[in-house]
Image: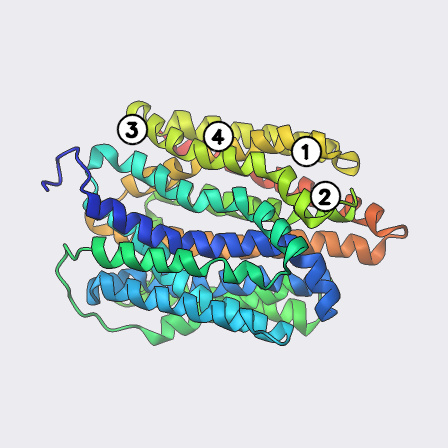
């Protein structure tokens, strides 16, 4: 196929689907297990701030692995990388199926994070490298739909499985998807770029781990420890030192793991800021609503999943719609329309957070997820279009790294705000959770205003 042809070969579509199914599996476990958090808290005797590590540990590992994607892509055949990713995720599934304790659950999720950390950037790199430029927006929207459909069905799937069979069966049901992914990837993934071995800067990798882990531990412990304690202030300080040293290292060597020189491009930086904050908001939202429905509205896990299902479907379907708008009308319309819808829904949720019935949640959450689905693929495509072709693999690594880290931060921050209210306010668990949810929505609303202003300034 000629790169300037509009036709997308079947093997390319199969390759995108194969890598997308791996990413889908990671997200569906994440959202399905969110529904199971109250069950896990009872079974393993852990707190709200502890159980959220089921999500955070996975996203943290992904955020550490993804920065290596540019080096991996240049040095190793992408089919080999895909096979390693698939087998790693499968191994993590087996660990979680047999986990005798909460600690083993976290280990399994971390191993799954290794698989997703390799597979996720592969999907977007295949699109950028092998899809005609005129169809990139559409395919980025479809790729986001593949991963976006997981939050749509994850809570319902998780609620049904938890209520009927138990939470361990969530992992059993992923095995056929992994087999299908393996078959599609083995057939469809092709090597089109020349391989060139490059050394891994292990110091940078260690600094990435210190940076992300320090900040995550600090934010996670805010709910249960004083700010000036070693668990909070010490961890945050360690993370900030790691970040400063990572920036220094990235600017002082020729081939850094994360090419932070790209942030000298102001339009790319503006896109990245909005993208980062949007991911914090998205995962914070995914944590808040299922727990609110169960703890405040006293519903089962299954009903909580059914309440958020229509919005998830709307968000997934709007992914390709936003991609088509991008290809035909440019970036500004789908991005600003989507972010404006998210802003409006967050304001509504904030105002009525203490008294949200299930029938109230459904339409407002549809507005939010529809807006998010419309804009996210366009944001990534628009950000990468500000770079040269040679810089796009590095830009993709940055976006995917920040996506996972921001997701972990969003879960941790939202859990921290809710846990603080549960700990320090008098009243029933339903009341303290409602107040904590409202406080978390206020935080997310402030962030979405910053996102709106950032995109309004840089998106053309």
- Between marks 1 and 3, how big is the CA–CA gap? 32 Å
Q: Residue 261: where, in percent of width, then height?
A: 31, 55
Q: How is the image coloured?
A: rainbow
Q: Are marks 1 and 3 in contact (CB under 8 Å)?
A: no
Provide the residue designation for mark 2: 293
Mark 2 or 3, closer to the camera:
2
Left-right relation of 192 to 439: left
Provide the residue designation for mark 3: 327
| 268 is higher (above) or lower (below) than 176 | above
Q: Residue 78: where, in percent of width, then height?
A: 23, 61
Q: Residue at x 52, y 62 (%)?
A: 171
Q: Quadrant of the C terminus?
A: top left
Give the image quarter of residue 4. top left
Give the image quarter of residue 70. bottom left
The answer, for residue 413, to whether it is visible in the render is no
Provide the residue designation for mark 1: 361
Mark 4 or 1, closer to the camera:
1
Q: Residue furthest left?
A: 2
Q: Which mark is residue 338?
A: 4
* Disc 4 residue crowd, few under 14, some 14–19, many 20+, Cα 10 Å: many
* Disc 2 residue crowd, few under 14, some 14–19, many 20+, Cα 10 Å: many
């Amino acid at each position: 196929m000629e790169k300037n042809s509009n036709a997308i070969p079947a093997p390319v579509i199969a390759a995108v689907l194969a890598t997308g199914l791996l990413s889908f599996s990671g997200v569906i476990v994440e959202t399905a297990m969110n529904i199971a958090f109250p069950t896990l808290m009872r079974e393993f005797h852990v707190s709200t701030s502890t159980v959220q590590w089921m999500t955070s540990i996975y996203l943290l590992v992904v955020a550490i692995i993804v920065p290596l994607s540019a080096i991996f892509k240049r040095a190793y055949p992408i089919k080999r990388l895909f096979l390693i990713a698939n087998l790693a995720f499968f191994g993590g599934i087996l660990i979680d199926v047999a986990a005798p304790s909460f600690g083993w659950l976290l280990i399994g999720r971390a191993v799954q994070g290794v698989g997703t950390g390799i597979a996720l950037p592969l999907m977007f790199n295949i699109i950028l490298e092998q899809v005609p430029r005129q169809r990139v927006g559409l395919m980025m929207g479809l790729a986001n739909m593949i991963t976006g459909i997981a939050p749509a069905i994850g809570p319902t799937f998780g609620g049904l499985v938890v209520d009927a069979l138990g939470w361990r069966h969530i992992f059993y049901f992923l095995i056929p998807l992994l087999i299908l992914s393996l078959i599609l990837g083995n057939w469809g993934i092709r090597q089109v770029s020349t391989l060139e071995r490059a050394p891994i800067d292990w110091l940078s990798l260690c600094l990435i781990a210190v940076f992300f882990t320090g900040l995550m531990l600090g934010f996670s412990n805010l709910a249960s420890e004083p700010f000036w304690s070693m668990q909070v202030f010490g961890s945050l300080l360690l993370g900030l030192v790691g970040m400063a040293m990572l920036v220094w290292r990235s600017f002082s060597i020729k081939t850094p793991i994360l090419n932070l020189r790209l942030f000298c491009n102001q339009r790319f930086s503006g896109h990245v800021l909005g993208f980062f904050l949007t991911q914090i908001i998205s995962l914070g939202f995914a944590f808040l609503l299922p727990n609110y429905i169960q703890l405040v509205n006293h519903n089962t896990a299954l009903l909580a999943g059914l309440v958020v299902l229509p919005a998830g479907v709307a968000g997934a379907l709007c992914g390709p719609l936003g991609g088509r708008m991008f290809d035909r009308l440019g970036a500004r319309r789908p991005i600003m329309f989507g972010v404006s819808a998210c802003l409006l829904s967050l304001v509504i949720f904030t105002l009525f957070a203490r008294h949200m019935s299930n029938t109230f949640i459904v339409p407002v959450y549809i507005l939010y997820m529809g807006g998010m689905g419309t804009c996210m693929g366009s944001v990534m495509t628009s950000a990468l279009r500000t770079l040269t072709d040679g810089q796009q693999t590095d830009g993709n690594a940055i976006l995917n790294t920040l996506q996972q880290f921001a997701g972990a931060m969003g879960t941790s921050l939202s859990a921290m705000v809710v846990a603080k209210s549960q700990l320090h306010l008098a009243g029933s668990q339903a009341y303290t959770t409602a107040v904590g949810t409202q406080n978390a929505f206020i935080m997310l609303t402030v962030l979405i205003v910053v996102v709106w202003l950032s995109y309004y300034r840089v998106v053309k």
